[in-house]
Each structure stands twice: as structure tokens, then as C-alpha cells.
Image: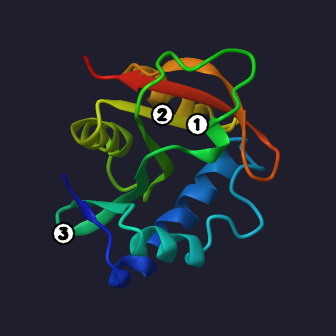
């Protein structure tokens, strides 16, 4: 697998991967996480323009996508039912999605991000059991709950590369 920054010509492939991920979530009981057009093309284009969007390529096929943002995440400023394990600069993973054609997308994303920044944070929906499993299997530690822009709760995790 290879990871590179997304380009504008990747938008259709990224949106197709997001569509597959949405179908997967619904079929696995997560019916409320990515709804009402989120994440839409405008968010993906914004991520690309901001140099925060990445694609994971396997055999010349875009197999996964994610956004990685270094700096403070506004929704992480308040955490309930716990606390972040570290108070230091971090990167945040958002919109991690697999096209379902190969295994290991989340692990590849996590390893890549940890080579960019030694402390990373991520969150996911309480009904996204598959993502929780991938996050916890990699070694992220549960921190508490955060609330995203629309007020819905997410489980927050962090990981420090030692």
C-alpha cells in the first residue's frame, strides 16, 4: 500500500469510497453517523485544498481515504466522561473510509499519521463498532466523549508513539 496526498482528480474515487463506507455502516447497525450528505464533496474538496486529504493506493487503485489535520481540533476542546491522556500538539484523523477491496486500511492510515506526528487523536460514533475495534486493536486509548459540530456524541481516543 502507498499513501499520498489527494488531488482534485481523486474526488470521484473518494466519494465512491465514502458511499461504500456509508453502506457498510448502515448494514452493520450504524445508521446515524454519516447522514444528510455528510461528508459531501465540498468537504472533500476543502480537505484537498487545505492539504489534509490522503488516499491509500493498492495496485494502482484508490482503496481508502482519510483526512489528517495537524493542530487543534475545535470539537476536542471539551471532553466529557474522561480526559485526553496528554496535553501536547497533535494531529487528528477524520473521515477514514475503506472501499472494502483490501484489508488493513485503518492500520496503514494510523501508521502513516504516526510518522507525521507522534501524538494523534481520533473519534468515532458509538454505533461504529468496526471502527472502534480497529482503533482499539491498534492501541489507541479511550479518553471520553466529545461532541461534534451538530451536537452528537463521539467516543474519543488518543495514541502517543513512544
Q: Read off the residue under disc 1.
A: 123
Q: Residue furthest right?
A: 151
In the displayed structure, does residue 1 sit left or right of residue 142?
left
Q: Can you give x and y, in whole percent of width and height, for residue 101 in the image?
A: 36, 56
* Mark whose residue sits in front, 2 or 3: 2
Of marks 1 and 3, which one's residue comes earlier in the chain?
Answer: 3
In the image, what residue occupies the spot 43% across and 59% down? 99
Of marks 2 and 3, which one's residue comes earlier in the chain?
Answer: 3
Look at the picture and state if 83 lies above or below 123.
Answer: above
Q: Read off the residue under disc 3.
A: 60
Contact check, label 1 and label 3, Cβ < 8 Å: no
Residue 126 shows in this picture: no
Q: CA distance from mark 2 to mark 3?
A: 29 Å
Task: Identify the mark at residue 74; answer none if there is no mark.
Answer: none
Q: Read off the residue under disc 2.
A: 121
Q: Nearer the viewer, residue 34 or 23?
A: 34
Amino acid at each position: 500500500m502507498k499513501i499520498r496526498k489527494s488531488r482534485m482528480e481523486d474526488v470521484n474515487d473518494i466519494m465512491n469510497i465514502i458511499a461504500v463506507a456509508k453502506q457498510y455502516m448502515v448494514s452493520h447497525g450504524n445508521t446515524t453517523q454519516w447522514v444528510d450528505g455528510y461528508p459531501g464533496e465540498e468537504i472533500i474538496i476543502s480537505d484537498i485544498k487545505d492539504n489534509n486529504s490522503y488516499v491509500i493506493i493498492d495496485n494502482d487503485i484508490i482503496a481508502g481515504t482519510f483526512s489528517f489535520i495537524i493542530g487543534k481540533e475545535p470539537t476536542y476542546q471539551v471532553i466529557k466522561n474522561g480526559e485526553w491522556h496528554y496535553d501536547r500538539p497533535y494531529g487528528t484523523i477524520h473521515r477514514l473510509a475503506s472501499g472494502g477491496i483490501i484489508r488493513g486500511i485503518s492500520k496503514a492510515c494510523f501508521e502513516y499519521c504516526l510518522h507525521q506526528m507522534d501524538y494523534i487523536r481520533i473519534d468515532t460514533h458509538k454505533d461504529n463498532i468496526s471502527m472502534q475495534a480497529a482503533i482499539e486493536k491498534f492501541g489507541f486509548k479511550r479518553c471520553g466523549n466529545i461532541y461534534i459540530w451538530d451536537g452528537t456524541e463521539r467516543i474519543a481516543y488518543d495514541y502517543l508513539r513512544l
